[in-house]
Amino acid sequence: MKRVLLTLAGIAVVAVSAAAGYYLYRNGSPGSHGDATAAVPSAAPATRASHVVGKARPEFSLPDLSGRRHSIDEWDGRVIALNFWATWCPPCLKEIPQLISLQSEYGDRGLQIIGIALQKPAAVADFARKHGINYPVLAGEAAVVRVAEDYGNTIGALPNTVVIDRQGRIAYARPGPVTVEKMQKIIRPLL
Amino acid sequence: MDKRFHAFLIIVLAAAAVPGAPSRAATFAERLRGLAGGGDGSGSGEFLPADQAFRFTASVAGPRRLSLMWEIADGYYLYRNRFSFAIVKGGARIRQDRVNVPTGTVEHDQSFGDIEINTGDLAVDLPVRRDGAGAAPIVLRVRYQGCKKNTICYPPITKDIALTLPPARAPQ
């Protein structure tokens, strides 16, 4: 009977190892990439994780609306929401008041929204002033396309929002409009 | 007897557990990805790349006519006033005064007011004025822009297409 139990235990070990091995083969080692999508709050069940989620945020620098260059590492340690947009994009304009409201509400707790306009700075400056955008806006054309691609936007569509946690890892990245409620669910666990 | 029983156990359990493990592991992995909001990894699963949202073809319809066609995916649209057409290389010009983009539908946008959009299949003929009667290689530049309703918009799209106008027999 003892031998039977030993045999059963041995088979169980083999079976579990096979399952674990297959899982690691399919998904990489724990913490290596996609499984870090667990960082995406489960409060966003209807969304699909981008291939950049869980990865360290890429470096970039872009000019603001007065021409001064900013590097993304200026905001290290805060929860960053990069919002890619343009003035010709109706869904982008619709979400800007909500981003302004989020910055007002959560700025003191560590949220930093950064608008990244896919346009020349001069084309955006009036709009930003007129609409009272209360967060930094960076702008550019080809350079912004490259940054958007680096941050997982493979189809080049706007708006596109990327959330980076305090450790500099991408927690959320996807095209499509966001709302205050949706963003709250994403950022609150990170603040 | 003991040995045969052990062999039987090994065969039955191995058949039940080991070959089944990959499918169970895959299901588990898929479930994990689902919990994490995972999908196809593109981050853009529900949105089409621009060239799939607006399938575009251009062809020569005659010595003085080009034919353009867009198949616009369901839920997507092109702005009627954002089309532009030009021959940027070769001895011919588009007769802009005779270009007619089909009438679209008017929608109201809170930022832009009334906008006219084209959906579904869209065909545009481009009458061409040519410099000579011989076969004429040209490069046609077409620009257009569109969105998926209420969700995303694409930057202006520019296509340069190399075409050859066949020889023209009669004068224009």
Image (spheres, rainbow, N blue to C red):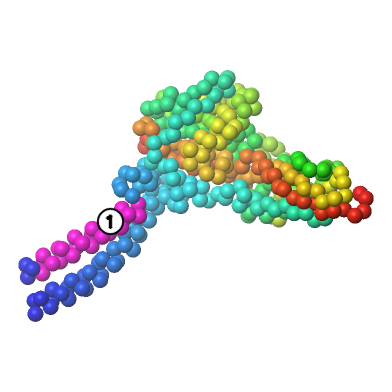
Judged from this view, the residue extending furthest toward the left is: A2
Residue A3 location in percent, x, y? 8, 68
Residue at left offset 47%, top offset 25%:
A71
Comparing A126 with A156, the one in front is: A156
Q: Is residue A82 magenta?
A: no
Residue A25 location in percent, x, y? 32, 54
Residue at left offset 60%, top offset 44%:
B150
Looking at numbered disc 1 in the image, what kind of residue is underneath it? Answer: Gly
Q: Is residue B6 left or right of residue B163?
A: left
Q: Secondary structure at mark 1?
A: helix
Q: Which residue is mark 1?
A: A21
Answer above or below: position of B131 versus B22. above
Occupied quadrant, residue B7:
bottom left
Comparing A24 with B138, the one in front is: B138
Answer above or below: position of A88 versus B12. above
Q: Is residue A7 magenta?
A: yes
Residue at left offset 35%, top offset 32%:
A167
Judged from this view, the residue extending furthest toward the right is: B171
Q: Is residue A82 left or right of residue A11?
A: right
Comparing A123 with A109, the one in front is: A123
The quarter of the image holding the N terminus of chain A is bottom left
Q: Main secondary structure of the magenta part?
A: helix
Q: Chain of mark 1?
A: A
Residue B132 location in percent, x, y? 87, 46
Judged from this view, the residue extending furthest toward the bottom is: B1
Mark 1 Cα-neighbour bin, 10 Å: few <14, some 14–19, many ≥20: some
The quarter of the image holding the C terminus of chain A is top left
Q: Is residue A164 left or right of residue B122?
A: left
Residue at left offset 74%, top offset 50%:
B163
Residue B36 visible in this rendered orientation of the protein: yes
Residues drawn in magenta: A4-27
